[in-house]
Image (cartoon, rainbow, N blue to C red):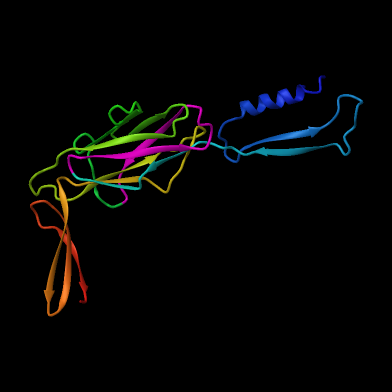
């Protein structure tokens, strides 16, 4: 047997096992001789574990605040693995982590690739997929909100959370959790007023919808 034939077989095995496995891949290597050129001393078998380097997919930023009728950007990132290989990642749309009422897909918001970006994004209610091309490490998502009610019927914030679904053997879902998006049903503003009572200055900050009083927190400042 040619001395390099085992090397070819090992290389072929490594190429076949180049995929994500829990705990990596393990191969047993036995030291032996098929010729009289040498004798193993002592003969035996060793276990070799090959660690995986799978792609890691994350979504960010962690929180995004949007008034009605505006567009904001989220991004899906990949790192690790072999960036020269295309990768498809799955996303899930669910509730945000702030206790807001669920925003309605198509009525209050939609998500698509930014115009002219060329990114491959297929999302609908509940989630969908994004496609990373060869050597592409970021896919942008345009979150477009619709103009909300003018009256007081929907004064509360609504929202959703966007997270990376488990990737099985293709990739690992990374990050600390979903990217939360909060949507105001109509334009809002932060207002601050100052009052002086018996030498004490009180600052009042309000976050409210235009045309309506906001809800704020009072704090006292000694002059």
Q: Residue 133 lies in what quarter of the image?
A: top left
Which corner quadrant holds the C terminus? bottom left
The image shows residue 194, relative to residue 199, as above or below, that is above
The answer to which of 66 and 161 lies nearer the viewer is 66
Residue 36 horizontal/vertical position (percent): 92, 25
Q: Residue at x 84, y 31 (%)?
A: 32
Decide which of 31, 187 is in the foreground and name it.
187
Res. 126 visible in picture: no
**Residue at 81% in and 23% down:** 3
Q: Is residue 194 magenta?
A: no
Q: Is residue 181 left or right of residue 89?
A: left
Q: Which quarter of the rendered picture does the N terminus lie within?
A: top right
Q: Residue furthest top?
A: 1
Q: What stretch of residues is rendered in magenta?
A: 68-97
Residue 90 on image: x %, y %: 40, 33
Residue 183: give x, y in percent of width and height: 22, 45
Query: Residue, x 90% and y 30% (percent of image)?
Result: 38
> Is residue 80 one of those drawn in magenta?
yes
> In percent of the image, x 20 and y 49: which residue is there?
157
Vertically, is 17 above or below 75? Answer: above
Q: Is 92 situated left or right of 1 in this image?
A: left
The residue sitting at the right extreme is: 36
How many marks the image carries: the answer is 0
Q: Position of residue 208 (x, y in %)?
A: 15, 55
In front here: 139 or 177?
A: 139
Note whether residue 67 is visible.
yes
> To which quarter of the image does residue 161 belong?
top left
Of residues 214 and 162, the one drawn nearer to the viewer in this rendering: 214
Direction front: furthest residue? 223
């Amino acid at each position: 047997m040619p001395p390099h034939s085992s090397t070819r077989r090992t290389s072929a095995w490594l190429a076949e096992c180049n995929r994500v496995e829990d705990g990596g891949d393990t191969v047993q290597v036995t030291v032996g001789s098929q010729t009289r050129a040498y004798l193993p001393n002592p003969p035996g078998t060793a276990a070799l574990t090959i660690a995986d380097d799978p792609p890691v997919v994350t979504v960010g930023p962690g929180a995004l605040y949007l008034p009605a009728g505006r567009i904001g950007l989220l991004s899906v990132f990949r790192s690790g693995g072999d960036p020269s290989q295309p990768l498809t990642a799955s996303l899930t749309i669910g509730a945000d982590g702030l206790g807001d009422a669920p925003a309605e897909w198509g009525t209050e918001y939609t998500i698509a690739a930014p115009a002219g970006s060329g990114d491959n994004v297929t999302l609908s209610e509940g989630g969908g997929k994004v496609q990373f091309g060869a050597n592409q490490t970021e896919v942008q998502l345009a979150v477009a909100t619709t103009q909300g009610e003018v009256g007081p019927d929907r004064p509360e914030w609504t929202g959703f959370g966007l997270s990376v679904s488990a990737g099985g053997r293709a990739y690992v879902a990374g990050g600390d959790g979903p990217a939360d998006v909060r949507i105001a049903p109509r334009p809002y503003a932060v207002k601050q007023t100052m009052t002086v009572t018996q030498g004490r200055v009180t600052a009042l900050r309000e976050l409210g919808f235009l045309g309506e009083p906001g809800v704020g927190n009072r704090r006292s400042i000694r002059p």
